[in-house]
Image (tube, helix red, strand yellow):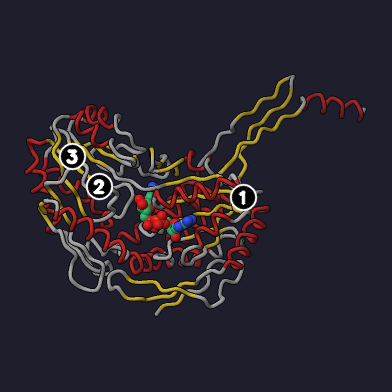
């Protein structure tokens, strides 16, 4: 059994208390992670607050350190990727790619050139508008994407001059600990800290008086609690929450040509990603063609332990997630849904579920209306484009969406009508890039991450105003002469 007990340089977190970490491919406990006590949490936040005083002062140094962090992540991608697969389940190649993509985020924020906000020097006076960091940031992340989402928070927060305490999900604490280990020689003590522990560590971190900003990614239910916890202290919040993304396939698309892309835009990471296709609307005339073509990809996808060569889909990450997916599938089948592929858990101790394509489902069914977050795709026929758009938008969520067709201009016209933070054409995640804003409408969140907009979310504006500097200079000159 592996035991990881130290995190970043900073307060000693080795009081001995630990909690179990399970490998979802086997269902067995394979490691222990440190369970941070309330005293250690307090000491860590205080250390981060102390580090903030100097870290905020030297932007050139911060940029240089972000570059060093990117290099360190790249150099240790294989090692961190193995930890990620072991605790989260995704295929090793995807896990290693996540680490390299995370390095891209650090490099993007190292290189981001920022124009001065406002600068004015007139006979009336001197004015400058600047962006100041906020202080200690709590970065709280979920189990589905523990590496990349940590980088989405840490890179802009640190570039802006904040310090960060990262709190991963108790289901996937080891990736963040491995990152902290790799970055411990990159950042000064207290600048980048990882704290792990079971609930209610997140609640306590969010409520700590020295935390000035909470950047939260997770469920809508918990996001609302985080917003409420932040309110009494007026902490700033960015909330990246749930999604139930729709994809609309237009009449001019070709089922054989796009079935594979549609499948992977729904099933990557076993559907356990916020911005993936969760419900698919296709033209009634071609309904059977789409169902058959996508079901064929589902039937041939290779499911297994993410550590094994050639595996395309690993297990679900937690036993609770498997139970939830089984509940939704069983309920749909009992209500008359017909599986074109899959429909059942896969026998064994790991948390595996067959890639499942469901027909005879409709809006109003829980499998369509709720965020299922698993390897099930309900496919529905639409009457006309207005019908498809109305049904895609009839959701409390509004994270991502996509439109598929050969006439790109027309597809863009439809995409513009989707009520979602991301609306892509012929690919569901085309807009997820370091320089583009990512966020959700409605219950999918508040604020955005990435790009300069994501950076600005870790800052506050300050207006510096002074009398004319020329007058002062003239006075000084007069006094000297
Ligand atoms: P979750 O909301 O249960 O937990 C997220 C994180 O919050 C975990 O670290 C958890 O320990 C912590 N937490 C739990 N209660 C807390 C509290 N009261 N205060 C502070 N922190 C608390 O989510 P999950 O089950 O880990 O992840 C799946 C969810 O995340 C899905 O809803 C998915 O859509 C969402 N998600 C959203 C995005 C996005 O960018 N919008 C990205 C990935 C995942």
Q: In which quarter of the image is residue 252?
A: top left
Q: Which residue is drawn at 15% across and 46% down?
A: 361
Q: Which residue is tagged 2?
A: 278
Q: Quadrant of residue 87?
A: bottom left
Is label 3 within 8 A of ligand 1 (CB to nearest ligand atom)? no
* Residue 100 appears anywhere in the view: no
Nearest to N terminus: mark 3 or mark 1: 1
**Quadrant occupied by the N terminus:** bottom left
Disc 1 residue crowd, few under 14, some 14–19, many 20+, Cα 10 Å: many
Q: Which residue is tagged 3?
A: 281
x and y, in percent, of residue 324 in the image: 27, 59
For the residues labelled 2 and 3, the Cα–Cα distance comes to 10 Å
The secondary element bearing badge 2 is classed as loop
Q: Which residue is drawn at 56% across and 34% down?
A: 115
Work out which residue is located at the far front of the displayed protein and give it.
335
For the residues labelled 3 and 1, the Cα–Cα distance comes to 45 Å
x and y, in percent, of residue 170 in the image: 43, 65
**Quadrant occupied by the C terminus:** top right
Nearest to N terminus: mark 2 or mark 1: 1
Disc 2 residue crowd, few under 14, some 14–19, many 20+, Cα 10 Å: many
Q: Which residue is drawn at 39% across and 65% down?
A: 171
* Residue 333 appears anywhere in the view: yes
Which marked residue is nearer to the observer: mark 2 or mark 1?
Answer: 2
- Mark sitting on residue 171: none
Give ligand 1's quarter of the image.
Answer: bottom left
Disc 3 residue crowd, few under 14, some 14–19, many 20+, Cα 10 Å: many
For the residues labelled 2 and 1, the Cα–Cα distance comes to 37 Å
Q: Which residue is tagged 1?
A: 135
Q: Is residue 265 left or right of residue 87?
A: left
């Amino acid at each position: 059994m592996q035991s990881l007990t130290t995190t970043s340089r900073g307060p000693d977190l080795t009081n001995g208390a630990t909690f179990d970490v399970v490998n979802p491919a086997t269902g067995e406990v394979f490691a222990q992670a440190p369970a941070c006590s309330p005293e250690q949490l307090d000491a860590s936040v205080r250390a981060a607050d102390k580090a903030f005083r100097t870290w905020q002062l030297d932007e050139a140094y911060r940029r240089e350190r972000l570059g060093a962090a990117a290099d360190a992540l790249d150099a240790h991608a294989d090692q961190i990727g193995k930890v990620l697969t072991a605790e989260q389940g995704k295929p090793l190649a995807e896990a290693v790619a996540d680490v390299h993509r995370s390095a891209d985020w650090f490099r993007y924020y190292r290189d981001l050139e920022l124009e001065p906000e406002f600068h004015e020097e007139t006979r009336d006076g001197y004015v400058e508008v600047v962006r100041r960091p906020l202080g200690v940031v709590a970065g709280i992340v979920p189990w589905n994407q523990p590496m990349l989402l940590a980088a989405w928070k840490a890179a802009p927060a640190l570039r802006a001059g904040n310090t960060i305490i990262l709190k991963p999900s108790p289901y996937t604490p080891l990736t963040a600990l491995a990152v902290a280990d790799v970055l411990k020689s990159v950042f000064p003590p207290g600048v980048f800290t990882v704290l792990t522990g079971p609930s209610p560590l997140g609640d306590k971190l969010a409520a700590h008086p020295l935390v000035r900003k909470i950047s939260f990614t997770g469920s809508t239910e918990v996001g609302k609690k985080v917003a409420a916890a932040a309110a009494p202290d007026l902490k700033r919040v960015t909330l990246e929450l749930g999604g139930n993304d729709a994809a609309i396939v237009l009449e001019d698309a070709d089922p054989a040509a796009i079935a594979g892309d549609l499948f992977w835009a729904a099933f990557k990471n076993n559907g356990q990603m916020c911005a993936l296709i969760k419900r698919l609307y296709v033209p009634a005339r071609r309904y059977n063609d789409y169902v058959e073509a996508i079901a064929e990809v589902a039937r041939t996808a290779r499911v297994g332990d993410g550590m094994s060569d050639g595996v395309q889909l690993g297990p679900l990450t937690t036993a609770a997630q498997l139970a939830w997916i089984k509940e939704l599938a069983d309920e749909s089948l009992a209500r008359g849904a017909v599986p074109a592929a899959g429909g059942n858990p896969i026998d064994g101790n790991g948390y595996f579920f067959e890639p499942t394509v469901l027909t005879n489902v409709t809006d109003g069914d829980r499998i369509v209306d709720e965020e299922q977050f698993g390897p099930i795709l309900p496919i529905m026929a639409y009457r006309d484009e207005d019908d498809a758009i109305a049904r895609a938008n009839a959701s409390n969520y509004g994270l991502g969406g996509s439109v598929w067709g050969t006439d790109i201009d027309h597809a863009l016209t439809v995409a513009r009508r989707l009520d979602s933070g991301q609306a892509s054409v012929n690919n569901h995640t085309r807009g997820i890039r370091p320089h583009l804003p990512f966020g959700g409408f409605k219950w999918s969140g508040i604020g955005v991450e990435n790009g300069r907009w994501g950076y600005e979310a870790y800052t506050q504006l300050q207006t510096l105003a002074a009398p004319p500097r020329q007058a002062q200079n003239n006075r000084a000159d007069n006094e000297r002469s």
